[in-house]
Amino acid sequence: MLEVVDGGLLTTVQDAGRPGLAHLGVPPSGFLDAPAARLANRLVGNHEDAGLLETTGSGPILRARGAAIVVAVTGAPAPVRVDGGMADPHASLLLRADQTLSVGRAASGLRSYVAVRGGLAVDPVLGSRSTDLLSGLGPPVVHAGQLLPVGDEIAGDVPALDGLAFPAIAAQPVITLVAGPWDDWFGAEALQSLASQAWLVDPASSRVGLRLAGTPLAPARSGELPPEGMVTGSLQVPTNGLPVLLLADHPTTGGYPVIAVALEGDLHHAAQAAPGSTIRFRLRADPARPRT
């Protein structure tokens, strides 16, 4: 067991999520920064998609209960301590019985990941242990006094590494977009504005979506769209012209036009975009889509 001494600002259990259930109105959920989460699991010898903790801003304090536990912390750089002594991030750490692990405030970026050898064995809901902040599916937000069971999702031995270098989190990341399906509702001028400015991350952002502030995108036509399915990475433009990049806990349908969709491989940048930071977009042509 892991005992939660302090839950941190916002800590949730996440795994690979609930893909393929959008027709039932169920968001995909799961890791926001998948490369960092999967690295944490590899460092403790788990299957890559095993359940772990995703922190936001400042992490939890955890105590090993009953036996020693191997842990690893990846993602946003933050102070990692074992019983108050500094420990290495991006490394396998031994937490002896009754020792505590604490993950402090992120120095850059936003989300860190805490993996435990064997994975977290909270009860799955619809095949996943992920907390969904939109629908409420999955385990509750991690809180003080909670006991988190450790499972047996072990893939192999703990890697014989003292530590592993991890790419620095970009101060102003660039996310690649493919225009459409409703870019024709805005026109070339709005697309140019989308790609030419730095967008400020609004404090109202969450696992549901990254809300952005900047020069509003003006539509080239009026009217309303019927609700349609939404995918992770959709860049919706509400009536105020300020885009929202949909993340893992997004609603499965929406009625605002989607001006572009982010490449899946760039979404980890959005996961680490803290309120008050800025991001930029790069538009990539879709050769399979004829332009008029």
Image: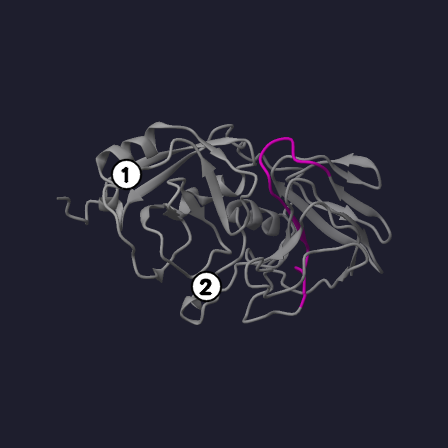
Query: Mark 1 = which residue?
Result: 284
Q: Quadrant of the C terminus?
A: top left
- Looking at the rendering, in which quadrant would you find the N terminus? bottom right
* Marks 2 & 1, CB-CB < 8 Å contact: no
Question: In the image shown, does 269 or 212 lie closer to the viewer?
Answer: 212
Q: Residue at x 70, y 44 (%)?
A: 59
Q: Amino acid at mark 2?
A: Pro
Residue 112 drawn in magenta: yes
Camera-side residue of 79 and 110: 110
Between 174 and 50, the one nearer to me in the picture = 174
Q: Is residue 157 visible?
A: no
Q: Position of residue 240 (x, y in %)?
A: 40, 42
On whether residue 276 falls in the magenta region, the answer is no
Q: Earlier in the sequence, mark 2 or mark 1?
A: 2
Magenta residues: mostly which secondary structure? loop
91 with respect to 257 (left or right):
right
Point out the stretch of residues depicted in magenta: 104-122
Q: Residues within 10 Å of mark 1 (few under 14, many from 20)?
A: few
Numbered label attached to residue 177:
none
Q: Is residue 189 above or below residue 64?
A: above
Q: Which residue is mark 2?
A: 19
Percent position of residue 88, x then y: 70, 36
In this rendering, would 287 be left or right of 64?
A: left
Whether residue 82 appears in this view of the structure is: yes
> Quick check: 55 above or below 78?
below
Residue type at numbered disc 1:
Arg
